[in-house]
Image: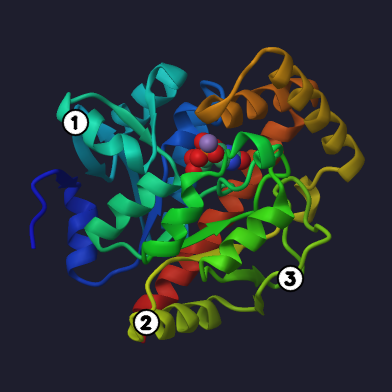
Amino acid sequence: MSNPYLDISPEVAQAIDSNQPVVALESTIIAHGMPYPRNVETAVRVEDAVREHGAVPATIAIIEGRLRVGLNLEQIEYLGKEGRRVTKVSRRDIPFVVTVKQDGATTVAATMIVAAMAGIKVFATGGIGGVHRGADHTFDISADLQELAQTDVAVVCAGANSILELGLTLEYLETHGVPVIGYQTDTLPAFYCRDSEFGVSYRLDSPAQIAAAMRTKWAMDLRGGMVITNPIPEAYAMPLAEIDLAIEQALQEMEQQGITGKATTPFLLARIAELTGGESLESNIQLVLNNARLAAQISVACCSC
Ligand code: PSU
Ligand code: MN
């Protein structure tokens, strides 16, 4: 079934058609999640990590109104350089950016949608969006959570960023039937830290077990995604007290500056990187690479049975 809005690169199309492992990658993390040029350098390293572990990377974005699966270096460089000038695109934004033939950096939600259109089942990123702090009065809950409830893609991440309410994010996912898997861990990883005070739904210890769970879920037509949480490598984890302090200060500044809605996550990530002297950025890069490796392994396991 061809989709008139979708452009899949020849390499990715060939891999999908021949049932070879493919890993989807998002582009909001490039344009809004990290500063230039580290964002471009990271995007390229993430693609390399996927390849080194036996899968084909498919970075997803909207380029001149086309839903693109598999970007070339020039397109990645362009998104990285444009940064926040590129529209951050979640589910609601897709038709508008496509209609006016603009560019868009896809969030977890939008990347899942396009990955599913292309037939890709595994997606690696840093952290999913979630229930924001203060959501009891702002109602700010990322559309990523609703997407996970309805789109059949497994998202490999380092848990949710502790700029969010982790407990409320887990409750929301549970309500919507989204399993949160801990890869070799019983507790929910909190992005910069390996642990949190919260438990995962299920612990699975190998890519093959994760692939089997995905297969079973979708073979039964139980719609929706899965969150696969992968703790940041020990060497790059940050001390809880240090990161909490930076997050608290960044949140205060955000409130003072009146930053709300879709601008909050990019603001917080950038400010936390400044406040930690770049340490949080380094952690962020390493956890994404770690997730790319696991996602590739899961994707290989999915194809080899
Ligand atoms: N969390 C991070 N880094 C990111 C994001 C979240 O630690 O780059 C990005 C992802 O693209 C995610 C999006 O899908 O932010 C969520 O934004 P919002 O809360 O506005 O839905
Ligand atoms: Mn929001």
Please determine whether, in this image, residue 200 is positioned above or below residue 212.
above
> With 184 as the anchor, is 123 left or right in this view?
left
Please indicate, yes or no, whether residue 149 appears anywhere in the rendered image: yes
* Nearest to N terminus: mark 3 or mark 2: 3
Residue 138, image quadrant: top right
* Nearest to N terminus: mark 3 or mark 1: 1
Tell me if label 1 and label 2 are in contact, CB under 8 Å. no
For numbered disc 2, what is the local secondary structure? loop
Spatial CA span between label 3 and label 1 = 40 Å
Q: Amino acid at mark 2?
A: Ser
Residue 47: percent from left, percent from top: 43, 47
Q: Which mark is residue 304?
A: 2
Which residue lies under the disc numbered 1?
65
**Front residue of 259 and 209:** 259
Between circles 3 and 2, the one closer to the viewer is 3
Residue 154, image quadrant: bottom left
Residue 64: percent from left, percent from top: 19, 27
Spatial CA span between label 1 and label 2 = 35 Å
Q: Amino acid at mark 3?
A: Thr
For numbered disc 1, what is the local secondary structure? loop
Q: Residue at x 70, y 73 (%)?
A: 184
Residue 105: percent from left, percent from top: 38, 33
Assess disc 1: are there few (<14), some (14-19) or many (≥20) residues with their C-alpha within 10 Å of its C-alpha.
Answer: many
Q: Amino acid at mark 1?
A: Gly
Residue 46: percent from left, percent from top: 49, 46
Q: Quadrant of the C terminus?
A: bottom left
Q: Residue at x 39, y 77 (%)?
A: 302
Q: Which mark is residue 219?
A: none
> With 167 as the anchor, is 266 left or right in this view?
left
Which residue lies under the disc numbered 3?
185
Between circles 1 and 2, the one closer to the viewer is 1
